[in-house]
Structure formats: C-alpha cells, structure tokens
Amino acid sequence: MKLQGKSIQCVVATLLVALAGGTASLALAEGRHGHGGMGGMGGMHMSERMLDGVNATPEQRTQIKQIMQSAMTDLAAQREAGRALRLQAMNVFTQPYVDANAAEALRQQMLARHDQASKRMMQAMIEASRVLTPDQRRQLAEGLAKRQEMMQRHQRERGQMDKRG
C-alpha cells in the first residue's frame, strides 16, 4: 500500500496519538501505582502490545522503553507540581471569600504545567517514532484504527444495553 498526501498525514497523526496514549498511560500508571507501570497493566503493557503488533526488534523495544522511561521521570516532577497547584486551588476555594485573581493565577499556572507536560510527551513521541520504520508506523496506525473501531462498537452496544434496561 503506497501512501500519499493526506494518507501520510493521517498515518503520522494516528502514530502521534498512539504514542501519546502510550505515554499518557504510562504517566497515569505511574501516578496511580507509584512506579513506571513497567510490569503491570499500565501504559507500558499497552506499549508492549503495540510493539508486538509491529514486530519491533529487541533493540527497538529497548530504545523505546528508554525514551518512555526518561519521559516518565521528567513528568514525575511535573506531576508533583500539579498536586501542589491542586492543593493551592483547594485552599483558594475553601476560604470565606474566593479570590478570583488568585484562582485565575492558579488556572494559568495549571495550563502552563499541562503545556510543559504536553511538550515533553510530544518530544518522547517524536523520539520513539524515529526508532520505528515507516512500515512499522503504518502497521501501528492500522492496528490503532481497528482498536478504535472496536471500542466504538462496544460503546454503542453498551449504550443500547443501557437504553433497554
């Protein structure tokens, strides 16, 4: 299958979403479980499944794991900063008088923190995409499209079941 123009853009966009999802899953797994999710059902498990699906070599797996682990280490400090901001926000909103300026300042700090995390995740995704071949990235995009279709089908089925009863 030869890809051109918009098809290439779709594959690249899908790859970035996939890698972002894996990275975000890793961050969530680390945040919930206090570790990088390297062994359990966290994002690294999904990354392993994705790498299995594209027949990644042991070298590629090692490189991608290192890239993602580095990103998770960097994001851990940002996660702590986010907790501190949420505590500050709770303090602002539990005062007898809610200071709108203080709340807005916190909101802007939270946005800046999210932007930093997004930039770091994108950097990791770009690095990981460079480890995979164009064919592997295409396979990854196709697998993710199938997975998304399955998830949407399950959501529709659940919605129909909810309506019945």
Image (cartoon, rainbow, N blue to C red):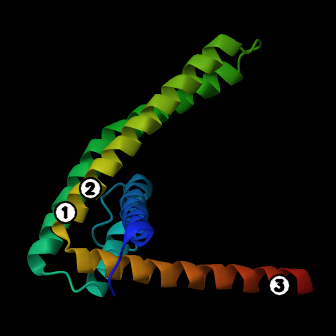
Quarter of the image where one finds residue 133:
bottom left
Which quarter shows the N terminus? bottom left
Mark before the other along the chain sequence, 1 or 3: 1
Residue at image x 55%, y 29%?
A: 87
Question: On the image, numbered disc 1 is attached to which residue?
Answer: 130
Q: Measure the alpha-carbon separation of dots 1 and 3.
A: 42 Å
- Residue 40 in sight from this viewpoint: no
Q: Which mark is residue 32?
A: none
- Closer to the chain start, of discs 3 and 2, is 2
The amino acid pointed to by label 2 is Ile
- Which callout, 3 or 2, points to the residue nearer the camera? 2
Residue 101 seen in the current view: yes
- The answer for how far apart the CA atoms under marks 3 and 2 are is 39 Å
The quadrant holding residue 19 is bottom left
Q: Residues within 10 Å of mark 2 (few under 14, many from 20)?
A: some
- On screen, residue 16 above or below 82: below
Which residue reaches farthest right?
A: 164
The residues bearing labels 2 and 1 have C-alpha atoms spaced at a distance of 6 Å
Which residue in the rendered view is the most extreme toward the left? 59
Q: Secondary structure at mark 3?
A: helix
The residue carrying mark 3 is 160
Q: Position of residue 92 (x, y in %)?
A: 65, 19
Q: Kindly check if marks 2 and 1 are in contact, taking CB atoms under 8 A apart as contact.
A: yes
The x, y position of residue 156, in whole percent, is 74, 82
Residue at 51 percent across and 32 percent down: it is 111
Residue designated by label 2: 126
Q: In the rendered image, which quarter contains the C terminus?
A: bottom right
Left or right of residue 39: residue 64: left
Image quarter of residue 25: bottom left
Which residue is rendered at x = 9% and y = 74% of the image? 59
**In the structure shown, which secondary structural element does the residue marked by tag 1 occupy?**
helix
